[in-house]
Image (cartoon, rainbow, N blue to C red):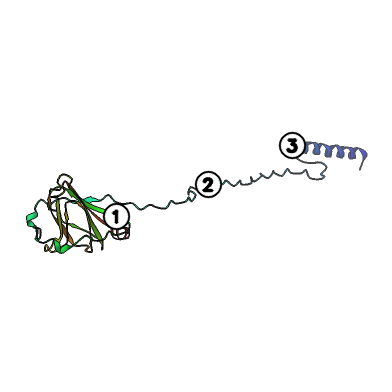
Amino acid sequence: MEKGDIITLVVGVILVLIMAVVANPQVQLFPGQPAPVPTPGETPVPTPVETPVISSTPLPTSTPTPVPTIAPPYQIYYSSDPFTYPRFKMPENMNTFGAGDLLRRDEMVTFAFMNGTRGGLSQKFRVPYPVWVLNTTVTADRNPQYGNFRMVLCYAANGTIIDGEEILNRGSMTRVVETSGAEVYMIITTAYVDYFRIELATPRDYYDAYTPA
């Protein structure tokens, strides 16, 4: 090949290469080590922070010992129709009932009472306790020498007398009754009595065990 031809060939190759670079700048004339491709950075994962849990349940506190309560005693009134009762008259002889019973030493709870100055027949009522007492106090200050109080407790079904008491002048008396659940009533007569009060009470154990909820 002639020298002129070689030069022409070299010039042609150079021109071709220049045109290729101009047309595609990414073409490398002299390939070497590939350019490092940047690796996208890893997004750091946040470390979870534990939030303290506050319980809504209140902390246990010491519970005070409950104190037993006593319901207010209910009042027994006189009946408005005494002549419909099976017995409405006082027995002739009150000596059969004898003296009063001994006062119980248990803790007693008063659950009912009746008071007044005159006599009559009480309303009918029921007592749920196996053992209970009638505590009667009579005041006769104006004419103590003539004071007289008499009471009998009767079954409402047939008028049978359960127990009775008589207080002459003035003073107190206790009767222990062992009748429960049956309907009963009281017949009362007074003479020269300023005031009387009958309290119905039962031992605390019976009150707690048998008092209706």
**Number of residues whose C-alpha sits closer than 10 Å to that of mark 2, classed few (under 14), some (14–19) or many (20 or more):** few
Question: Is disc 1 placed on a helix, strand or loop?
Answer: strand
Q: CA distance from mark 3 to mark 1?
A: 117 Å
Q: Quadrant of residue 86?
A: bottom left
Which labelled disc corresponds to residue 109? 1
Give percent across and percent down for residue 211: 28, 57
The residue that disc 3 covers is 23
Mark pair 2, 1: CA separation: 48 Å
Q: Check disc 3: other Cα within 10 Å, few if <14, some if 14-19, many if 20+.
A: few
- Pointer 2 residue: 54
**Disc ID at residue 99:** none
Which amino acid is tagged 1? Val
Q: Earlier in the sequence, mark 3 or mark 1?
A: 3
Q: Is residue 207 left or right of residue 196?
A: right
Where does the C terminus fall, quadrant-wise? Answer: bottom left
Label 2–label 3 contact, CB within 8 A: no
Could you tell me residue 210's position as x and y percent?
28, 60
122 and 34: which is toward the camera? 122
**Above or below 190: residue 158:** below
Taking the image as shown, residue 167 lies to the left or right of residue 25, namely left
Q: Nearer the viewer, residue 18 or 92?
A: 92
Q: From the viewer's perspective, is residue 140 above or below residue 180?
A: above
Type of residue at label 2? Ile
Residue 122 appears in the picture as rendered: no
**Mark 2 or 3, which is nearer the eye?**
2
Position of 74 compared to 61: left or right? Answer: left
